[in-house]
Image (spheres, helix red, strand yellow):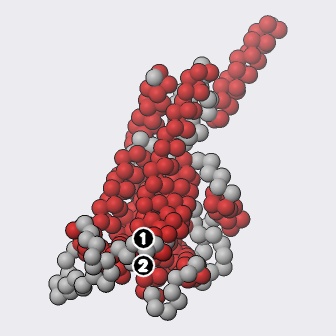
């Protein structure tokens, strides 16, 4: 319990320093406060409530937006499962799969970029919350270009996913809108957050603006995190787990389509879209749980060892002070 209290106190102290710091100052807390405990898996205190709000809003959008009544557009009669009643809230969702996917994509377009913006500030500045939004809007001169690159790269990813879904067995001609909307939804879940936080990989695609980052380093981040699955920092796990969850959930969500239950909710592409959305949500919550566990594990390890990690800058300063004191003592003895 002592280690947990110390860890929570560390989070509060770090966020207090960030609030008091002017916008144009550095975010290096170790240089400001040498006694502040530096944990490799430290997370901002706003991270758990923000990800929970994001998950709740996204779930509500997926369920409630398709039930929005549209004037002069009544629900069509069910095409399957006439002898199998379903829950009332599923009727507008299963009646028009294309419109349901349109509503789902609208919710993803509104909510995923908001969360990706918070992750970007966390990765670059180590902070979250309203203050980070203010700094992001005022202190990032490349935000417009990076947003454009993220949207364009997501569109490219949606085209690639469309081809992959067709190769996996989706109809090539008959259900083009269904497949296109499904690919766009999964692209926003799996591709937009890392494309905005890390920057898109350098693949020579047109319409992408030139980035100030190093191309080799930028591509290496994508390979290390998503190909090698080597997420070393908390915000990298917050990118990796939802991406894999969305892709794996979409693949698993295809299974109910082939079953002979003849239910209305088995219409393509409702189950892959639901699986991808559920996988994204589970991945985000799993990343939260893993980050919290690793954070408390670091705090407990530091508490059990009885020492704190000394920041690099303060360690150099203390070393110089010690050397200066030793030099003074030697000169005094010689006199």
- Which residue is at 54% across, 63% downward? 248
Distance (Cα) linking label 1 and label 2: 7 Å
- Which residue is at 17% across, 84% downward? 71
- Which residue is at 66% across, 29% downward? 315
Mark 1 residue element: helix
Q: Nearer the viewer, residue 223 or 145?
A: 223
Q: Is residue 158 above or below residue 126?
A: below
Mark 2 = which residue? 268
Q: Is residue 231 visible?
A: yes
- Which residue is at 66% across, 52% downward? 230
Q: Nearer the viewer, residue 67 or 258?
A: 258
Q: Residues within 10 Å of mark 2 (few under 14, many from 20)?
A: many
Give the position of the N terminus as an image quadrant: top left
**129 sits left or right of 335 in the view:** left
Q: Which mark is residue 271?
A: 1
Outermost residue toward the right in this view: 334
Q: Residues within 10 Å of mark 1 (few under 14, many from 20)?
A: many
Q: Is residue 282 above or below residue 84?
A: above
């Amino acid at each position: 319990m002592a280690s947990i209290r110390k860890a929570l106190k560390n989070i509060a102290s770090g966020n207090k320093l960030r609030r008091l710091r002017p916008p144009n100052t550095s975010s290096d807390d170790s240089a400001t406060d040498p006694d502040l405990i530096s944990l490799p898996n430290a997370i901002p205190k706003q991270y758990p409530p923000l990800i929970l709000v994001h998950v709740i809003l996204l779930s509500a959008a997926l369920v409630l937006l398709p039930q929005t009544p549209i004037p002069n557009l009544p629900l069509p009669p069910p095409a399957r499962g006439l002898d199998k009643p379903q829950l009332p809230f599923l009727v507008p969702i299963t009646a028009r799969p294309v419109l349901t996917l349109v509503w789902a994509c609208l919710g993803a377009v509104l909510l995923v970029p908001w969360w990706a913006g918070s992750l970007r500030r966390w990765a670059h500045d180590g902070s979250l919350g309203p203050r980070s939004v203010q700094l992001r809007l005022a202190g990032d001169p490349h935000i417009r270009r990076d947003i454009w690159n993220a949207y364009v790269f997501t569109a490219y990813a949606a085209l690639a996913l469309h081809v992959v879904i067709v190769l996996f067995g989706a109809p090539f001609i008959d259900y083009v809108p269904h497949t296109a909307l499904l690919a766009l939804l999964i692209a926003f879940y799996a591709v937009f957050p890392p494309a905005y936080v890390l920057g898109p990989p350098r693949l020579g695609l047109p319409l992408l603006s030139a980035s100030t980052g190093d191309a080799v380093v930028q591509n290496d981040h994508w390979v290390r995190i998503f190909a090698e699955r080597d997420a070393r920092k908390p915000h990298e796990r917050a990118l990796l787990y939802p991406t894999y969850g969305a892709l794996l959930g979409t693949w698993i969500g295809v299974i109910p389509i082939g079953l002979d239950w003849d239910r209305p909710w088995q219409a393509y592409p409702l189950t892959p879209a639901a699986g991808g959305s559920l996988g994204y949500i589970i991945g985000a919550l799993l990343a939260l749980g893993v980050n919290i566990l690793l954070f408390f594990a670091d705090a407990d390890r530091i508490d059990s060892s009885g020492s704190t990690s000394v920041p690099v800058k303060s360690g150099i300063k203390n070393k110089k002070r010690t050397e200066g004191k030793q030099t003074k003592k030697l000169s005094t003895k010689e006199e």
